[in-house]
Image: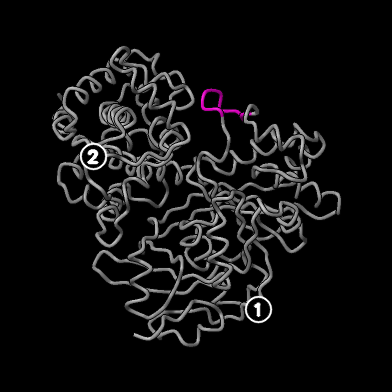
Amino acid sequence: MNEPIKLNQSNLSQFPREISRPTYDRSRLTTGIVHVGVGGFHRAHEAFYTDLLLQSEDASQWGICGVGLREADRRMATILGQQDYLYTLIVKHPDGKVETKVIGSIVDFLLGVDDPGAVIDRMAAPETKIVSLTITEGGYNVDAETGEFDISNPDVQYDIEHPSTPRLVFGYLAAALKKRREAGLPAFTVQSCDNVQHNGDLIHKILVAFARLQDAELAQWIDKEVCFPNAMVDRIAPVTTESDIEFLRTKFNVDDGWPVVCEPFRQWVIEDSFSAGRPNWQNHDAQFVEDVKPYEEMKLRLLNAGHSVLGILGSVFGYQTIDECVRDDLFSKYLRKFFDVEATPVLDAVEGIDLDAYKATLIERFGNPSIRDNLARICLESSSKLPVFLIPTIRKNLADGGSIRYAALVIAAWCYYSDNHADRHGQPLEVTDTLKDELHEAAKATSNDRLSFMKVKQVFGDLANDERFAETYTEMIDRVYRDPDVTDHMREVIGGR
């Protein structure tokens, strides 16, 4: 085989016809969107929608500048820079069909750790209309116990004192908005694309709270002038593997240092509230609505919670990927019962959505054998995911007298996972979590205090004080620690015992 063709702008004409590529003139694009947190999801979702827009109409003002704020973002910055910010999207269908497409909507990438001023200036530039975010649930710096901005974080304290060289996204946003205000420019929109309930409302609250610590007048201006549309985002994009890179080399003789893999399904529901205009994403199946909350709650309590249910139980059992779990009839049945018995009863009606069909589609998507989403990825940072995806469902069912047994078994299995860092066979489990040490120590104390894990207040708040939950959770802890083969306990929960 000839030397692989390196992905960059000048080599696109050499790519095989089976790979779609940008037909628009990328040299004409200006940065209308600055995106913080360029990972697989952003590149499979917002950047993909924007690429579709650029292909179909003159939308050259909506190019994307990616931003990484951490040293860990350097590899992405380097690879995208070498590829003229191009990358390949590999869409894997359940029937084995694979579509490949080069995405051209990202036109630049800045690293805040190298030059925070350059990032602030780009956000503050007149042509920037939207600053969007995928900073993960933990990036919002919320105190789980109070629900307020955590000002005790050392990086927050640093950013308050050093506004021109911030470390956290709030510092960058505040600094850029201050420059725009002083220059007489309109505010940009801050658009969260994270799997966080009421994500726009949350970043609004957090950013104003941060700005108030620096400049009370700026905080008032942000509160009045900046739009923070809530949004529900959905597309499964597992971590890119070496085999995905090799697929492009073997099948197409193309060298892409960091392609993105995703499923064909995609969904984006956005409140139509923007400070300085927006792209016509609705022409490519994005949905603009007055109130996104019923849609985002549906997704968080079903899809995201469902991921965690399978991810934690499947990991302890010894499975590696989400599709492995779904191919097991017991796991698939347990998930559907969790959906029907505990999640659906606490959801509001969602206009235009058939919930039974939606739940069936979720299980079909999870079982896509072409999207081998690793359980270790699903379980990473569970301490910030479960308070958003699963624990609100538990609290609502406690208030309504509903079932909590399905979710309680998941929490008990997570305690075992955090205690042993191993599955039921003793095989090590990868644990990536900001609270890894605290969770481990709390779980380790379970032998002396069966509620010790539940007393990690950053995650569970006061849930351990609820008598019914404490009783059910204790029962599940006893079951799991007596026999970590979770399938026996799953059958008992399904059977109502």
Q: Name the mark on residue 427.
A: 2
Q: Is residue 220 visible?
A: yes
Give the amino acid type for the residue marked by disc 2 in the picture: Gln
Residue occupied by mark 1: 27
Which residue is more in the foreground, 90 or 23? 90
How crowded is the residue under tag 1: few (<14 C-alpha within 10 Å), some, or many (20+)? few
Give the amino acid type for the residue marked by disc 1 in the picture: Ser
Give the position of the C terminus as an image quadrant. Answer: top left
Asked if residue 477 is positioned above or below residue 427 in the image, the reply reads above
Q: CA distance from mark 2 to mark 1?
A: 51 Å
Judged from the image, the secondary structure of the residue bearing numbered disc 1 is helix
- In the rendered structure, does residue 146 fall within the stretch colored magenta? yes
Give the residues drawn in magenta, as a range. Answer: 143-150
The image position of residue 291, as x and y in percent, is 54, 46
Q: Quadrant of residue 433?
A: top left
Asked if residue 158 is positioned above or below residue 193 in the image, the reply reads above
In the image, which is nearer the foreground, mark 2 or mark 1? 2
Judged from the image, the secondary structure of the residue bearing numbered disc 2 is loop
